Amino acid sequence: MARMPPPLAVACTALLLLLFVSVSPCRAASGGGPSAVLLPVSKDDATQQYVTMFRQRTPQAPLKAVLDLAGATLWVDCEAGYVSSSYARVPCGSKQCRLAKTNACTTSCDGAPSPACLNDTCGGFPENTVTHVSTSGNVITDVLSLPTTFRSAPGPLATAPAFLFTCGATFLTEGLAAGATGMVSLSRARFAFPTQLAATFRFSRKFALCLPPAAAAGVVIFGDAPYVFQPGVDLSKSLIYTPLLVNPVSTGGVSTKGDKSTEYFVGLTRIKVNGRAVPLNTTLLAINKKGVGGTKLSTVTPYTVLETSIHKAVTDAFAAETSMIPRVPAVAPFKLCYDGSKVAGTRVGPAVPTVELVFQSEATSWVVFGANSMVATKGGALCLGVVDGGVAPETSVVIGGHMMEDNLLEFDLVGSRLGFSSSLLFRQTTCNNFRLG
């Protein structure tokens, strides 16, 4: 659905809140900036979205936003109570405007000057990637502050004095988690969080993502920090890496002809269930010249989505390996469900066959255990958490948020590679146990 008006048109965990009590900000300086900054993450149970909080504006105010591995920039609602003395427009034709790859320019706003009403200002097209609604809005800068520690006691903030983002409209927040006033882009785009923060604080252009299940805390780590989890589990040198691929055709809702996708694609070659290869039409796993096919990761997609023939092959294989577990009627959106009372529990979730996502070789297999493959539903059903994406989707496999929970994923934008840990539960820890500072 597209909604294009005229131009300019649940509580987080205690840890997340503690990170945003008032503390003295620590500005980045040449040679003296932070080596890493963080975003705390929690899961909104009502929407299955992953939300974060950060501080923006002068005086600084806490903002809640939904995390997105796609998108072009951070966007926030500038219509509802945006008050700041430090915002500044990005002029039309400026270097920043050119780097943002937008030809839009606001020249006809007659109201009182505000972030949502500025003339000679670079224009952007913020998109709600949950509802696929987009609009137009000003591209501006303002102060933004992020934590430098992740622990039960609050620590110092690092401040970007002129962080570029796009103004969205209030209606654009419809469909987002309660209280969210925008979306944080973690994509490859020039002004998404990873690249803009790396340029601001002069650390490595990479980030690590650790999504939590409901009622727990997770984290996004930007820059150079050890991946240490209690009780003393260091994953910094034990990740498995696979190349990140570039889709030659944009997969964004708003794009220009010739744009490449800024989302994260990986080269899935096989899927295994209980160690046995699932027969697939492997041409669907490759990205063709039109940008169709392949495998990407998405934090706004709750459950992994598979093209119809892949979905049938995987669910058939899984059903064959679990024939001794009593089945129950399907619970939408899932097709394969079991009597949860008949499935034993393990350290890594329900005792069911593993699902393996095999990338360029057997040595680069992402092993998915029951905690990430199965979904407990109301009424006691336990379902295989994959969804039928139809016969001709734009992307054949979309790895959704549930499959990523309590797994550490490192997105190395310089090396163009994805590092993954498989389940942290197997190592007797969780995303909630990450510590820095």
Image (tube, rainbow, N blue to C red):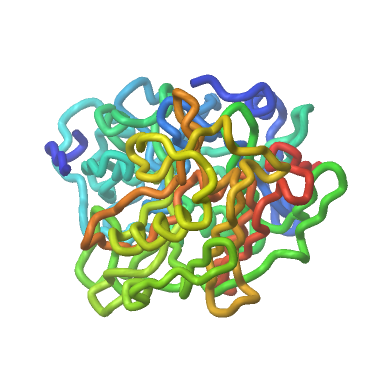
Residue at 17%, 35% in the rendered image: 109
Extreme-right residue of the structure: 232
Quadrant of the drawing holding the N terminus = top left
Residue 247, by quadrant, is: bottom left
Where does residue 115 sit, x and y in percent of width and height? 33, 34
On screen, residue 350 above or below 70: above
**Vertical comparison of 48 with 206: above or below:** above
Number of labels in the image equals: 0
Q: Residue at x 37, y 20 (%)?
A: 81
Residue 207: quarter of image: bottom right
* Rendered location of residue 227, percent (x, y): 75, 53
Q: Is residue 270 visible?
A: yes
Q: Is any part of residue 99 visible from this angle?
A: no
Residue 346, quarter of picture: top right
Locate residue 210, reporting x and y percent.
Answer: 62, 47
Quadrant in which the C terminus appears: top right
Q: Residue 330, position in %: x, y?
A: 35, 37
- Outermost residue, front direction? 324
Q: Residue at x 46, y 46 (%)?
A: 384
Left or right, 342 with respect to 34, comes to left
Q: Nearer the viewer, residue 115 or 354?
A: 354
Return the residue nearer the eye: 239 or 337.
Answer: 337
Name the residue located 62 percent from the left edge and 24 percent from the top edge: 13
Name the one closer to the observer, 346 or 300.
346
Left or right of 50, for residue 260: left
Q: Is 32 displayed left or right of 314 in the figure? A: right
